[in-house]
Image (cartoon, rainbow, N blue to C red):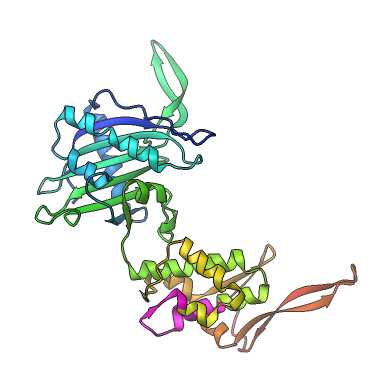
Amino acid sequence: MLRSLRVEHVAVHEVFQRGADRRIAPPVYATKLETLSVEALDAFRLRITEALNAKSKCIEMAIRRHGPGTFQGDVEQLVGASAAEFLERSRVIPDRLTEAQTTQNIPGGMVIVFSGTTGPLSSPFVGVIKAEVQDGFRRRKDGAAIITEFVNDLFLTKATRFYKIGFMVRSDPTKPSPDGWLALVFDHKIAASDREAAALYFYETFLGCSFKADAAYETARFFNLTRDFITKSVTDRDKRHDLTDALYTFVKTDKAPTFTVHEFTDRYVPEELQDNYAKFMKGKQFPDRAVQRDTAELTSRLKRRRFKYGTDIEFSASPEAIAQGRATIGTQAVANPETGQADAVTVITILDQFVKEV
């Protein structure tokens, strides 16, 4: 789909960070379309195709909001527009992004709206890039001299990738909107194992998209969110350890084809933590419906559990060994002769025979 990317129109606008009073600073709109040199256009296309083909940081999303007054509606207005129409109509994009950036910690940047066609069927597309502005140095010739200059308006650089891309392409013209459109979102902060790093304001509030239902992803997300809750909210060490054991058992060992947050809560979460856990998962917008169990994205994490003590001591065991009691971790009070106080020390008990040092 992203082969033979042909870019027709490019408009570069600018949006700004909200001030201390959280007031919106109006965008600066492009006054004309960009006329890129062959070299610049090649580099621009390369940035787009490399980003949208980066599987670890680019995600196909579901279009949840469509029609007039949405980004998808704007896309339909921009497809096939003349140069003058594209310049005028593209101004709604920085307006929409400015409204989506509701907090002061979201930086401003350049908003590059572009359109064209792609693929063997010349499928029309519209994309938007939010590129953060950086500073750096450049070298240039001034007569016989070579001068090093400091510049503070660099953006869309290859090395840093401080940008986000929203891209919608008309993948099937026979289907009504939004079914006939494919939405791709690139965010430089996304990690392969943590899609939550994607900026919510960009893909949801601005683009009107959401993550597609994905059993492997939702299972991994449940595991990661619950681990996060346990780490941050369960202060008692024994309860934290027991709840983590229960999480591994629930995700890996349970044979039921589906699961819900409510099931895990009822079976394993202490009563005094249940309300806080439910609020935490709801706040993270994890679904309360049944989720198909699929541990494909957790394979390596579920093989071994690793524990670290101090700066240079580590212990690992399989979740099964811990669940079966063949390896246990506990605490014991031991008198400290220097302070006269009882210190809590960790006691690891292994019921299997020593085999070898690895």
Whether the magenta-drawn stretch holds residue 312 is answered as no
Nearest the eye: 327 or 64: 64
Residue 353 placement (x, y as % from top left): 62, 89
Q: Is residue 76 left or right of residue 55?
A: left
- Residue at point 60% right, 63% down? 232
Does residue 4 sit above or below 217 in this rendering? Answer: above
Nearest the eye: 2 or 70: 70
Q: Main secondary structure of the magenta part?
A: helix
Whether the magenta-drawn stretch holds residue 253 is answered as yes
Specify the segment rendered in magenta. Answer: 245-262
- Answer whether residue 48 is visible to the viewer in this image: yes
The number of numbered discs placed on residues in the rendered structure image is 0
Which residue is farthest top?
Answer: 143
Residue 292 placement (x, y as % from top left): 35, 75
Q: Quadrant of residue 82?
A: top left
- Residue at point 39% right, 29% down? 26
Residue 57 placement (x, y as % from top left): 37, 53
Q: Is residue 351 left or right of residue 179?
A: right
Does residue 346 sit above or below 15 in this rendering? Answer: below
Nearest the eye: 143 or 253: 253
Which quadrant is the C terminus positioned in?
bottom right
Q: Is residue 199 left or right of residue 93?
A: right
Residue 323 placement (x, y as % from top left): 55, 85
- Answer whether residue 6 is visible to the viewer in this image: no
Q: Is residue 12 left or right of residue 308?
A: left
Q: Quadrant of residue 268?
A: bottom right
